[in-house]
Image (cartoon, coloured by chain):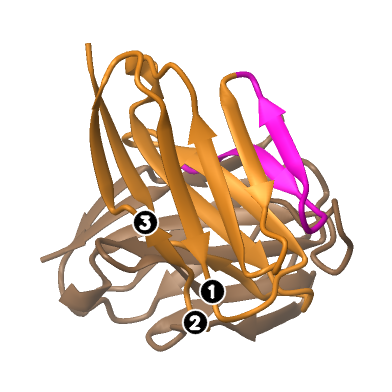
Chain colours: A orange, B brown
Amino acid sequence: GQQLNQSPQSMFIQEGEDVSMNCTSSSIFNTWLWYKQEPGEGPVLLIALYKAGELTSNGRLTAQFGITRKDSFLNISASIPSDVGIYFCAGWTGNNNDMRFGAGTRLTVKP
Amino acid sequence: DAGITQSPRYKITETGRQVTLMCHQTWSHSYMFWYRQDLGHGLRLIYYSAAADITDKGEVPDGYVVSRSKTENFPLTLESATRSQTSVYFCASSESPGKVAKNIQYFGAGTRLSVL
């Protein structure tokens, strides 16, 4: 199935800066998920979103389910070195096995 | 420990050999998935299983075989490995993809496979 359009592909930021990334699609989704993958590990769930317009936080992370249901955003505030990793979005269309993934945003944080 | 585990973590094999990657989950989740992860492609679904003895193809199933005789195990077999199958393979499980809030997929740590 068509994958999600995730941007940016990579980010190099200074510790303490805020980060924003997003995922878009031409399809409508019922659920948006944001995962983080560290080197040598599998993706770990950060935030799950279930309603259009929903804004959910997990510590310094905040994600939003777009009003059109075709996009989602993830913000990280006051980044720290341990935020380094690849962040993936995933969208569920409502069909049983149809979970689609973005290609990931690789985040590097310079101390 | 509870969770989803994959083995081996690393595997090197030769073209034409058969390779089986193992996946085991302790949550009694109904659904299990196999993905491959390649640079620039994100996660692509190979096969999934809705329950024991029920499997179905995903986006990139060619060259792979799966089985699910027990709910907790979902092995992935490359019958005759090719270089294009060099990748990182992730297994995931989900309680019930058809229900909101129960459709979250939980991933194993992955198997890094190199086919020489």
> Measured from the top left, where is residue A26 in percent x and y?
56, 81
Along the line of sight, the residue nearer the viewer: B32 or A5: A5
Which chain is mark 2 on?
Answer: A
Q: Is residue A52 magenta?
A: yes
Which of the two marks, 2 or 3, is nearer to us in this view?
Answer: 3
Magenta-highlighted residues: A42-59
Asked if the residue at tag 2 contacts the one at tag 1, i.e. Cβ–Cβ closer than 8 Å, the answer is: yes
Give coordinates of residue A109: x percent, y percent: 26, 23
Of mark 1 and mark 2, the one earlier in the sequence is 2
Residue at the spot of label 2: A2
In 3D space, how far apart are the residues under numbered discs 2 and 3 (Cα atoms)? 16 Å
**Do the numbered discs 2 and 3 sit on residues whose CB atoms are within 8 Å?**
no
Give the secondary structure at mark 1: loop
Residue B83 in view (yes/no): yes
The answer to whether A94 appears left or right of A33 in the picture is right
State left or right for residue B115 relative to residue B101. Answer: left
Residue at 51%, 35% in the rendered image = A75
Helix or strand or loop: what does disc 3 sit on? strand
- Name the foreground residue: A50 vs A68: A68
Give residue A25's mark.
1
